[in-house]
Image: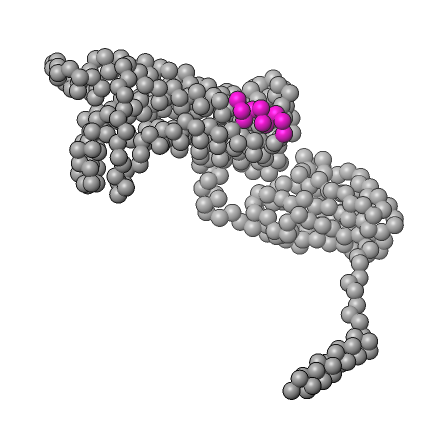
Amino acid sequence: MKDRLLNILLVSFVVLLGMNLFLPKPQKAVEVIEPNFVVSQSSVVVPNYPKVTLKNPSENTITFNTCKELTILQDLRTVTIDGPATAFCRDITVAPKSSQDINISELTQLFTKPGSVGFKIILNGKEITTNITVEERGSIRVLMATLFYAPILNLFVGILQYLPSHSLGLAIIIITILVRLILLVPQHQMMVSARKMQEIQPKIKALQQKHKGDQSKIGMELMALYKSEKVNPLGSCLPLLIQTPILIVLYWVLISIQDHSNYFYLYSFFKEFEISKIQHVFLGMDLLSIGGITAILLGLVVGITQFLQIWLSQKRTGPVVPEVPEERDPNSLMPDPQMMNKFMLWVLPVVIAISVYYFPLGVGIYWFIGTLFMLIQQAIANKVTETQKSKGVIISGNSQSTAKKSKKNIIIEG
């Protein structure tokens, strides 16, 4: 049996060796030595456009004019270059064994509707072509652009056109303050609500201890307590949730603020604004750049400012009663307030500081100015809460005296 197996292996080896020696070898792929177009994307979505590059692997230098020798096609029809688009006309030289980008930003009008856009050139008697498919935007993309992207972009442009040197840094500061002023009243109410939550923590713990093990009863009692105290248990999280979509849109706008495709989103009265003149260097920082030492320093500053704002929102006022450690019900569905507060205070600023590093510096500037504004606002909210507490608007659970009554309020202390 072993001899037969050995013979089979030997015959198989001989057959493979013979096939390798006598069968024709597979031909290697022939390297392209003729000039050719290279596009970053074969299909784009309105109004985006790809990067077009002419690659020259030959030994000869290529020189041509983008309007005289290069033919542009839209839906297979030749396009005539005129008006502002004539800025596209320029001489291009591509050295041997190199490549050269062809700036098509002046041709963005070709990418504002679905169809196809092609480029054709004849070099050394040979025709070189490439074609890009332009696809329509989806309904969600249209909705997001109409409701969020376009308004923020046009707000930027509306401010930039009146600023010296079209300073992007000053525009970000102004927009940050405007956003904060718009959110001033709801933000203040949320901050006051969050402070009230801090003040009524002893009563919340008392309810949880009293109805330990009965989650439905605890939930009902807590809802009644929140209603009577006029507080929102999500008050400390809502400010962050409000900022999130604004940050996302701001990121979208900043990373493409000088992209010519933005002309598609500009309102008619801003069409004459020249996006290329926007000054994105502010106080020595390139607001469009991501990462680097500057981003690390800015992230630290933003993280510390955020820490101070959260610390101020959690700061206890008045006499502090030592808390007795309680055994937490493992079946409880309610989040632990102490753990949430610690997470907000110690983890969230670190997450934000790290995030600043991966965003354009302009987003970091927005976050810093906004947090500084919130820091001042938080101090005012704390003062308002103390005033309400002194007047009995907030029911305290920390004192040990008897209940007092007034015409407007009932203060239960103890």
Residue 113, position as x, y percentages in the image: 57, 47
Residue 294 lies in the magenta stretch: yes
- Residue 99 occupies quadrant: top right
Q: Is residue 146 above or below residue 120?
A: above
Q: How is the image coloured?
A: one colour
Is residue 189 visible in the rendered image? The answer is: no
Judging depth in this view, the residue of 130 and 100 nearest the camera is 100
Q: Is residue 248 above or below residue 181?
A: below
Image location of residue 112, percent across then percent down: 58, 44
Residue at 36%, 21% in the rendered image? 313
Q: Is residue 318 above or below residue 342?
A: above
Instruction: Specify the quadrant that holds the C terminus.
Output: top left
Please give the name of the residue rendered at 66% of the width and 41% of the height, measured from the top-left corner.
107
Q: What residue appears at the point 59 percent right and 43 percent down from the top-left corner?
A: 48
User: Which region of the structure is painted magenta?
Assistant: 292-301
User: Main SS of the magenta segment?
Assistant: helix
Q: Quadrant of residue 30?
A: bottom right
Magenta includes 259?
Answer: no
Taking the spot 56% from the left edge, 45% from the top edge, the residue there is 46
Comparing 135 with 96, the one in front is 96
